[in-house]
Amino acid sequence: MNSASDMHSSMALVARNLGASLGGVPVLHDVSLALPEGRWTSILGPNGAGKSTLLKALAGVLPHSGDVSLLGTPIQMVSGRLRAQQLAWLGQNEASADDLTVLDIAMLGRLPHQSWLAPPSAKDMAAVERALRFTQAWDWRHRPLGQLSGGERQRVLLARALAVEARVLLMDEPLANLDPPHQADWLCVVEALLNHGTTVVSVLHEITIALHAHDLVVMRDGRITHHGPTQDTATQQALTSAFDNRIAIHAVGAQWVALPANPLPRLTGRSVP
């Protein structure tokens, strides 16, 4: 049997009794969870469940009560530089200077690895090229960010997060503005990261895509209602319950999909009253 210390060291992130507020209103209530290394965990739940707040608290970008450990060490004991090397973050609607080139934006992901005012090294350039090619943004590397569409910008911001080459990657709504083919490409990126041992934690509204994850954290009203393997019946029941049984989980081939639980009303062509 593994000791408690062995189990703790195999966890990418451990949270105990997390609480957080937004605008003085409590949003996260006494949340505890442990996320194992090298797996993909998706955080799901209805709007207002606290998903993004939980992710921000785990990333250390939002003040919170309670404790968080990163790769076995209390996060407050990890230096800012080391934390930025070990944990990469992609948030919602992140602002970036529109006059910076795509290459410049992606290179920001290498700052935790660089000495103060040092120019990018060959290793930095190689990491940025890999990240931009992963997200199919390499051909735009000399274009200003302001010239890109919303979906193209999102791919560049993902490349910036990938360029960190962190052991843990947290992503909040990474599929925003991406069309279905590029959502499929994102899944391929996640698979490649997992093959390299990276821990991936995502908040997604696209439930069918989230069902590709190893594990699901189901939230409602700022609390975790269930945390378990995606394929488990209990996990899927907790997910449908979180959405008031308005969705149903079905097996299609080798994957799970989420569909409306009730048939959609047929359009008759009459005016809506």
Image (spheres, grey):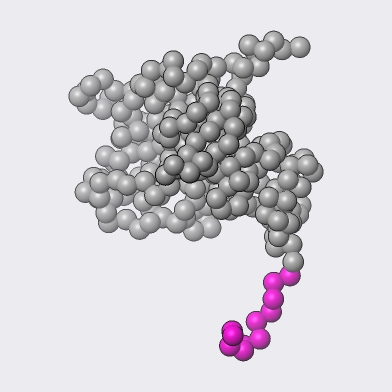
User: Is residue 266 part of the magenta span, yes or no?
Assistant: yes
| 124 versus 270 height, above or below | above
Is residue 23 shown left or right of residue 124?
right
Report the front residue among 29 and 134.
29
Whether residue 252 is visible to the viewer of this picture, yes or no, is no
Q: What secondary structure characterizes most of the magenta part?
A: loop
- Write the residue at 38% across / 56% down: 150
Is residue 152 shown left or right of residue 182?
left
- Write the residue at 38% across / 53% down: 152
* Magenta-drawn segment: 263-273
- Write the residue at 33% across / 29% down: 110
Q: Where residue 223 sits in the image (x, y, percent)?
A: 62, 40
- Write the residue at 60% across / 22% down: 11
Q: Quadrant of residue 215?
A: top right
Is residue 250 shown left or right of residue 79?
right
**Mark count:** 0
Report the front residue among 134 and 201.
201
Q: Quadrant of residue 88?
A: top left
Quadrant for the N terminus, please. top right
Q: Where residue 246 sits in the image (x, y, percent)?
A: 71, 60
| 24 versus 113 height, above or below | below
Whether residue 92 is visible to the viewer of this picture, yes or no, is yes
Report the front residue among 141 and 91.
91
Quadrant for the C terminus, please. bottom right
Q: Where residue 66 sits in the image (x, y, percent)?
A: 53, 26
Report the front residue among 24 and 254.
24
Q: Where residue 144 sits in the image (x, y, percent)?
A: 25, 50
Extreme bottom residue here? 270
| 202 versus 115 height, above or below | below
